[in-house]
Amino acid sequence: MTFHGKDIKIFTGNSNIPVAKQTAKALGLPLGKSNVITFSDGEISVSLQESVRGSDVFIFQSTSDPVNTNLMELLIMCDACKRASAARITAVIPYFGYARQDRKAKSRDPISAKLVADLITTAGADRVLTMDLHAAQIQGFFNIPLDHLLGVPVLAPYFAERFGKNTGDTVVVSPDLGSVTRARNFADRIDAPLAIVDKRRQRANVSEVMNIIGDVRDKRVILVDDMIDTAGTLCNAAAAIVEKGGATEVYACATHGVLSGPAIERIENSVIKEVVLLDTIQLPPEKACDKITMLRVAPIFADAITRIYDDKPISPLFV
């Protein structure tokens, strides 16, 4: 069995070209030459314009909006590389779409995250490299190796440098119970206490804040989540932290900025002073916002790719 190829080649779909270019530059490599186009009827065509025979191929593609188009680009690129005799194909998915459909919430629901995992494997991927899955158990949906990077080691140093560690006036807050582990990891890194917002979700993308577990009065608060979609949960939590909890300032950070629907408007009108995101999803110009700060993920992906190619563990990246 071939564990890796003779060299590294990096290709990208159309979803997040800047991250692929930055990663290739960090590795001292050119971005692979390929052409990904969409015909007038919506069909996607992929053409590899250089040989990948015997190579260790890494295909960058976030399955963000338009989700299905970007997913099909990834699948077709994997198939193209497999048929061109690549030694090993790694699907590099900075943002993994369909991750919120990870279980049956009610009768006759699909488990779409498992379906997507099967599609990626069938298309020819030999392993997956991704960051901050919405549900960690999705790693078990794959029958191929999956390396799971975390956003906290990138986000926490930003706030540690800005506000300092163990200052006594900063509290890390999880906006819901599902993000407690992530928020605790963040809090440990900046040596700050942890609080939790207890909410009740009435329907999809609508939530009601019920209670704040922990003391945030007269504190600077950092809300930590894995993604910001419509920003309803985030902005409601921020308002409750100020109005009910008595916090003086609210900042927020997340790995993935989905920012769909009214997200930008909500953030602009919220009490949040700054939202820090990683560039796992490319932010289009029309969604530019003075409150949003973007941090690069290319360095950590470059380190991970180097370790994968050299058959070394990626766990040191989380220290």
Image (spheres, grey):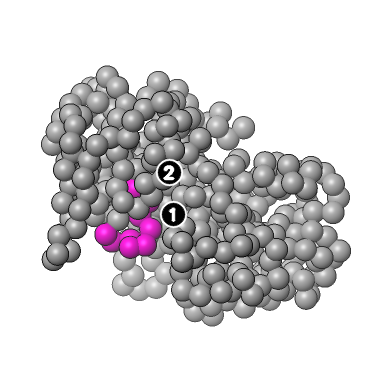
Which disc number belongs to residue 53?
none
Q: Is residue 122 visible?
A: no
Q: What x and y, as percent, mark residue 164? A: 79, 43
For disc 2, the marked residue is 19
Q: Is residue 296 above or below residue 288?
A: above
Q: What x and y, as percent, mark residue 18? A: 41, 45
Q: Is residue 304 left or right of residue 161?
A: left
Which disc number belongs to residue 282?
1
Q: For residue 71, what is the image quadrant?
A: bottom left
**Image quadrant where one finds the N terminus:** top left
Q: Amino acid at mark 1?
A: Gln
Q: Is residue 213 magenta?
A: no
Q: Is residue 197 above or below residue 184?
A: below
Q: What x and y, as percent, mark residue 55? A: 24, 26
Q: Is residue 189 above or below residue 15?
A: above
Of the numbered discs 1 and 2, the one sitting upstream in the chain is: 2
